[in-house]
Image (cartoon, coloured by chain):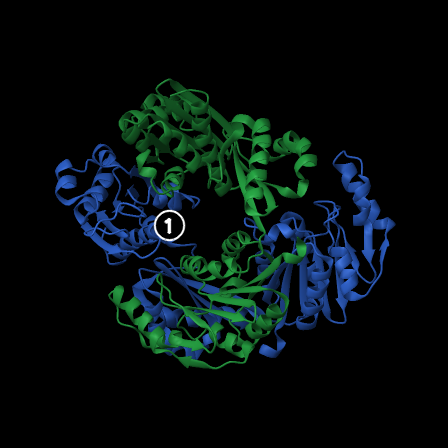
Chain colours: A blue, B green
């Protein structure tokens, strides 16, 4: 199977993609699209608007891969040099094309604008390349078939790039007839450590191949990405077999399949039986609510909650008894429970979540260090509380807290609590 | 000046970074950090967990740059092969180190866990490299000085990577004494469009150079990044002059300098006069609270709030009159006002924010389309409400809502309201 696998590389061009803010995201779209045709992106590069570096990089990549997709640097301004770099890398001439000039003129006309003089630069085509019309912008792309190796050069604007990718590149890949596609299926695990996962699933590596599984850990959730390749129907069946084998080992740790995260998994689990959820958040400050409401349709399950950042808010919004706060402190199992029960009662929800902790960097004591978080879940059958000291900075502690609290509800539901 | 400029490359290792979801973000942090020492990242690469490809890439990059920073692939599992790839690229041996094994053991012990057997893999060091202790995780890093070229190898977890970058790499760059640094200063603008900014500041391009300014727009905020390079004191003075000139043109649209976003700017503005803030969120579901509480010390200003996703929650948590909800609908200026006033009163805060809208994709009508959001700010001097139909998907509508509501409070404060 491996010998049939075609590889691809993405090259993003643009000095702004080497700055402190912006990342190239086109490579994600390209990766997803070419995977449908069994082509695997095995390398990504980003370089600035520098003819020499772009052309050297191109030569490198064309030697190594079956497909090279370049994005960016096709516009009309002086720093758009991708076209020239391609010509140099391939040792070919550039000439003005009347046909392409016509496309560009039509595009400006459609926008009710005069074609500016600098737009002429975009009407130049590299010998042997097929110019690709841009119906969503002005800069045309270029496609080369270099004795079996494809070189696609697209504008950097995602909306423009995507149109050419679908219309001009993917049909070419179809003709490769690899008959191979690669699919993945992701098991989301809640409340488990990466190293424990590895220990428990290792014995399955021999059967399904170590290369066909990736373990991605992220603050309270672990994603197990199962991959298979071959012809479509067989791949689906094989993934079913893999999924069953891994589920058997991991049991209730599996929170969902191909879900975006624990919020989606918990909403689904509650939604199946028409149950509702409310949240009472202190150190997470609304993060659990924000994550839940990211998901369209969450209003069917999630009714709302309180952000009780101050003690006063815990009393007023949630009815946490003043004595409890004085006796045990705001960061305690007792207060987490009272918060979960309070918000459940006040909003008449089936389940309530309470989270209280010290996210840092300030506020820690010897007794209650930075990172200590208590969380609780309250249902009609009882209230459960847990706590832990999470390692990491403020953002990390909050992320862990959010996931652990959601996972507690999930496990209690799975265990039959209501 | 250019000849003194040292160049760097970032190499992110990890097959998950070549998938359809995840991007390497460590390169942004590295770019920012090394820029303070005049080192410019001119190239980025991402490759999978493949010894051969990693080592070939490393050899390439080491030939071309003064600094190469590798992240990822240092963990204990079988697909963590960066250490082996470095050894191969440099033609060096790997040996087990008792010292490093001790660090790893101590780290597990601190977390109350046994050191698993697979952790031994991380205690191997490459000849000639300085092992870097990881105080935030288990995988140690490595630093090489290869006759003037630096090779830094860090774990992929950002929180762990950042600590080593600051502690182990940056002091090395100081010794390079390039004498040149590039600094930036960022003006954060709230409640303004990118195209309007460009029109208003264009006349300053001639004076300060078009290349020394970047305009980054993001759903209700615009960042204006001013840049200058040279020796440190001169750069700072030049940035002061630039900042004054741009501020003069932009006036109250400038929400802050070098702040992370509107939440930080609003907290600072309120904190200066000891005022407090509470939030009542519907369609944003806790996002404003989550953003405010991301910032350490936010508890001085932000007291909490309600996520009143359902109508029932709006009545119970905020005292929004039932009649108002029936007469005007939940998405209306009237309800936004009542939410802001209600949470302000209930939590005894100086300012209250109310947000109610239709984030989509469902729930829109002809009268009240998807994207329609009403927001309000209530202070002791009055309540102000605004609304708009935001273009974009659910996430974009929520982002705009969050920023517009915070900007309303900011402008009212700036205008002298209390």
* Foreground pick, A383 / B18: B18
Image point (22%, 33%), residue name: A312
To which residue does mark 1 refer? A395
* Foreground pick, A242 / B69: B69
Is residue B234 shown above or below B120?
above
Relative image position of residue B270 (x, y in whole percent): 38, 29
| Residue B318 picture quarter | top left
Q: How many marks?
A: 1
Relative image position of residue B55 (x, y in whole percent): 56, 74
Q: Can residue A13 be seen in this view?
A: yes
Relative image position of residue B346 (x, y in whole percent): 27, 27
| Residue B234 picture quarter | top right
Is residue B5 shown above or below A43?
above
Q: Can residue B326 be seen in this view?
A: no
Relative image position of residue B368 (x, y in whole percent): 49, 29
Q: Which of the chains bears the disc numbered 1?
A: A
Q: What element carries label 1?
A: helix
* Foreground pick, A145 / B165: B165
The quadrant the C terminus of chain B occupies is: top left
Is residue B175 shown above or below B256?
below
Residue pushed farthest top? B381
* Foreground pick, A185 / B196: B196
Q: How crowded is mark 1: few (under 14 residues within 10 Å), some or many (20 or more)?
A: some
Instruction: Please indicate whether residue B402 sits to the left or right of residue A247 in the image.
Output: right
| Residue B60 picture quarter | bottom right
């Amino acid at each position: 199977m491996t010998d049939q696998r075609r590889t691809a590389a993405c090259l993003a061009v643009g000095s702004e993609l080497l700055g402190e803010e912006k990342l190239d995201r086109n490579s994600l779209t390209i990766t997803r699209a070419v995977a449908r045709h069994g082509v695997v992106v095995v390398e990504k590069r980003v370089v600035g608007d520098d003819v020499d570096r772009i052309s050297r990089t191109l030569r490198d990549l064309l030697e190594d891969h079956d497909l090279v997709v370049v994005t960016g640097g096709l516009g009309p301004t002086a720093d758009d040099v991708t076209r020239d770099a391609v010509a140099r890398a391939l040792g070919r001439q550039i000439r003005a094309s009347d046909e392409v000039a016509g496309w560009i003129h039509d595009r400006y006309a459609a926008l009710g604008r005069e074609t500016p003089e600098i737009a002429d630069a975009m009407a130049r085509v590299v010998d042997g390349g097929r110019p690709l019309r841009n119906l969503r912008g002005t800069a045309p792309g270029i496609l080369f078939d270099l004795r079996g190796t494809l070189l696609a050069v697209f504008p950097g604007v995602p909306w423009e790039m995507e149109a050419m990718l679908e219309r001009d590149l993917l049909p070419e890949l179809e003709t490769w007839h690899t008959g191979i596609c690669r699919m993945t299926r992701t098991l989301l695990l809640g409340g488990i450590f990466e190293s424990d996962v590895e220990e428990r699933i290792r014995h399955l590596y021999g059967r399904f191949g170590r290369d066909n599984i990736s373990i991605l850990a992220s603050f309270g959730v672990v994603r197990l990405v199962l991959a298979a390749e071959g012809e479509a129907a067989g791949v689906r069946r094989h993934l079913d077999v893999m999924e069953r084998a891994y589920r058997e080992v991991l049991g209730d740790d599996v929170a969902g399949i191909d879900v975006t995260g624990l919020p989606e998994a918990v909403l689904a689990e509650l939604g199946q039986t028409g149950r509702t959820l409310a949240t009472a958040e202190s150190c997470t400050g609304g993060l659990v609510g924000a994550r839940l409401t990211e998901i369209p349709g969450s209003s069917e399950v999630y009714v709302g909650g309180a952000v009780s950042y101050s003690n006063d808010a815990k009393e007023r919004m949630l009815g946490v008894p003043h004595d409890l706060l004085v006796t045990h402190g705001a960061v305690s199992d007792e207060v987490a429970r009272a918060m979960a029960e309070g918000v459940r009662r006040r909003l008449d929800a089936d389940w309530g979540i309470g989270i209280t902790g010290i996210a840092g960097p300030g506020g820690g004591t010897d007794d209650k260090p930075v990172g200590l978080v208590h969380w609780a879940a309250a249902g009609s059958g009882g209230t459960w509380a847990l706590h832990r000291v999470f390692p990491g900075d403020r953002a990390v502690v909050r992320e862990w807290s959010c996931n652990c609290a959601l996972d507690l509800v999930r496990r209690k539901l799975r265990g039959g609590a209501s």
